[in-house]
Amino acid sequence: MALLEIRNLHVTVEDKPILKGIDLSIDKGEVHAIMGPNGAGKSTLSYIIAGRDGYEVTDGQILFDGKDMLELEPDERARAGLFLAFQYPVEIPGVTNTTFLKTALNSLRKGRGEGELDAMQFLKFVREKARPLGIGDEMLKRAVNVGYSGGEKKRNEILQMAVLEPVLAVLDETDSGLDIDALKIVADGVNALRSPDNATLVITHYQRLLDYIVPDRVHVLADGRIVKSGGKDLALELEAKGYAQFSSAEAA
Amino acid sequence: MAVTPETIDQLRSVTDEKYKYGFVTDIDADVAPKGLSEDIVRFISAKKEEPEWLLDWRLKAYRAWLEMEAPEWAKLNIAPIDYQDAYYYSAPKIGDGPKSLDEVDPKLLETYEKLGIPLKEQEWLAGVAVDAVFDSVSVATTYKARLEQEGIIFCSISEAVKNHPDLVKKYIGSVVPYTDNYFATLNSAVFTDGSFVYIPKGVRSPMELSTYFRINAQNTGQFERTLIIAEEGSYVSYLEGCTAPQRDENQLHAAVVELVALDDAEIKYSTVQNWYPGDENGVGGIYNFVTKRAACRGRNSKVSWTQVETGSAITWKYPSCILQGDNSVGEFYSVAITNNRQQADTGTKMIHLGRNTSSTIISKGISAGRADNTYRGLVRIQPKAEGARNYTQCDSLLIGDKCGAHTVPYIESRNPSAKVEHEATTARISEDQLFYCRQRGISQEEAVSLIVNGFCREVMQHLPMEFAVEAQKLVGISLEGSVG
Ligand SMILES: Nc1ncnc2c1ncn2[C@@H]1O[C@H](COP(=O)(O)OP(=O)(O)OP(=O)(O)O)[C@@H](O)[C@H]1O
Ligand SMILES: [Mg+2]
């Protein structure tokens, strides 16, 4: 049984169809990449998986570990092991990174019936996760995403992922805005978490990221549909030819 | 015989009759009859065996009050209060409340649970008749010995009137005169009890004056009076109130707090106010009309007010500082949360009289439901306040679209060398923030609490540690059900 199974998913926003029949199946241990032009519906797909309000599923289903994902509240999905690295991470003034992460981790632990970590235990744990990402105490004490540079925000998303240890991570353009060193750090962070028990869905515009996070499958999402799927070489092909071949038919 | 409406009517006519003909209160009674009169003022004073000068002071206040009009405040919707339909004195009664926690409203217990309040304290808060061997009493005695060692006086104001009459006489009404305002004047006439603190010269209080207070604050009643005097070079941190909602039948609370800081003295006064706010429709909540004022009389003196206001149907409160001594400092850090139908009109006054006086005001107002939240502040720089400075920051956070936030800053500068800065912001909890938190596994209610606590952080960090943790939980609890 696949970890994530999306079947014939149709989604509208304010009566406008955005996703028009998505089928996608991801097994444990796999990394999938989704590429596609701006406005294709990539972020929409990630939000639907995570349960954001304001979208209507008009048809189809999403199964996570065999269970109906669409029934669950966003926090319940997170507790089931889903993590979304946001394309645009949100600022929370006055709430330190440490407090935020500790609250999140303890919620997940509670959901799993584990005891909460106290402040000291947590600090030790988070420092271990932060070090390889080049995140120091100073950044841990800052308010979540407030005044962070674009690259810092993305690195912070990966830190959260590392701390929360999801079963399925969806990374929405985590590579955009990163310099080459940061890109490597982020990719290393993702690779460090790869295991036979979890899976990753990477949304990106650039083949470059996939040099570091090597995908098992690559899908092209254009105009609300997956128009092509293939192995990692598909990314190279897209890099060379662009998306014109997929959107021209629609545009005509 | 059953009590029929007729008997009640008969009773009423008899008492009315008595009242009309100059009714003399029976000093042995535990409860003064309903209503307010000169007799009642005399009754209270006699009950407390007060000296003549204090009775005179009360009577002057009462007579002044009769001439005053209740203030009309634009932002508060207040049903008229019938001052004759209330009791102004009742002796603390044992055995009147619930017999055990089983008899207490489960909703209240749930809140105590969430706040992590120990069982014994829950009983006390809920008004359970606790027996004499209540273990905290011995704790209080230990504290008291420790304080006495330092020469600190910390007792009820009634005790202070008996044991330290000169100090009380010298300072009571010296910061908030009995003619000050409608509610303070009423308080001066009928105050029943409150706290008295005296810190001698050069002494730093070895502990927060709180735990002891919590135990002794029981039954201070609706007209509380507090007086704190910090002598030269002394320091005290005082905690008032309680994060747990308190059972109280009195609808009107009109307290007066007076602080006096002499040369180089510092007083830190922290409040958590969580009186019953009424139901979703605002029925039954407490009206909280408080007058709090500090006189920074000495050079380099400092007073810092920190408040977290989450309770009461109506809050009307402006802790103020009169910065008289040169280089004196006044601070006001406030969080006011209103939910459902609550109304809060709160802020501060900083009156700069001395040279190089400075004040800081940080106010965080949070409104949810159909509530209204107003910051009302005054910064006045008098002509002699050479080099005075003020910094004011007022931030409002709205939850939902049926609530209101208002900022009314008054600035009067009569000295050209003064520097006054004012910043104000209004924000909303965004769907994006909530979704972001929830995607990380944080529940909706926890997310609201987290975001609001973040918003209040600059204020919360001024609370003493032991209070801060409870106050943070309280913020979450008071906003439950405000989103979603
Ligand atoms: N709340 C909304 N209201 C109206 N239109 C929306 C809303 N959310 C998304 N859309 C539209 O849905 C389409 C898909 O948007 P989405 O953000 O999913 O694209 P994307 O593939 O992630 O693009 P990009 O590569 O630029 O991030 C776009 O046309 C967008 O304008
Ligand atoms: Mg996108």
Image (cartoon, rainbow, N blue to C red):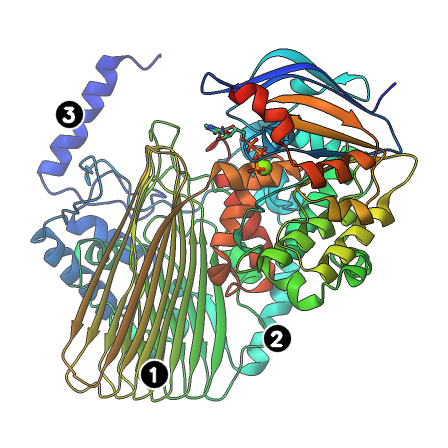
Q: Nearer the viewer, mark 2 or mark 1?
A: 1
* Label 1 crowd (10 A; few <14 / some 14-19 / many >=20): many
Residue type of the residue flagged with mark 3: Ser
First in sequence, mark 3 or 1: give its number: 3
Coordinates of residue B53 in the picture (x, y in percent): 22, 70
Q: Viewed as shown, does residue A199 lie left or right of A47?
A: right
First in sequence, mark 2 or 1: give its number: 2
In the figure, residue B166 lies in which quadrant?
Answer: bottom left
Determine which of the numbered discs, if any, sits on residue B13 in the image: 3
Along the line of sight, the residue nearer the viewer: B245 or A175: A175
Residue type of the residue flagged with mark 1: Ser
Residue carrying label 2:
B146
Disc 3 sits on a residue from what chain?
B
* Label 2 crowd (10 A; few <14 / some 14-19 / many >=20): some
Q: CA distance from mark 2 to mark 3?
A: 55 Å
Residue type of the residue flagged with mark 2: Arg
**SS category of the residue bearing label 1:** loop
Q: Are marks 2 and 3 in contact (CB under 8 Å)?
A: no
Coordinates of residue B357 in the picture (x, y in percent): 30, 83
Are discs 2 and 3 both within one chain? Answer: yes
Q: Nearer the viewer, mark 3 or mark 1?
A: 1
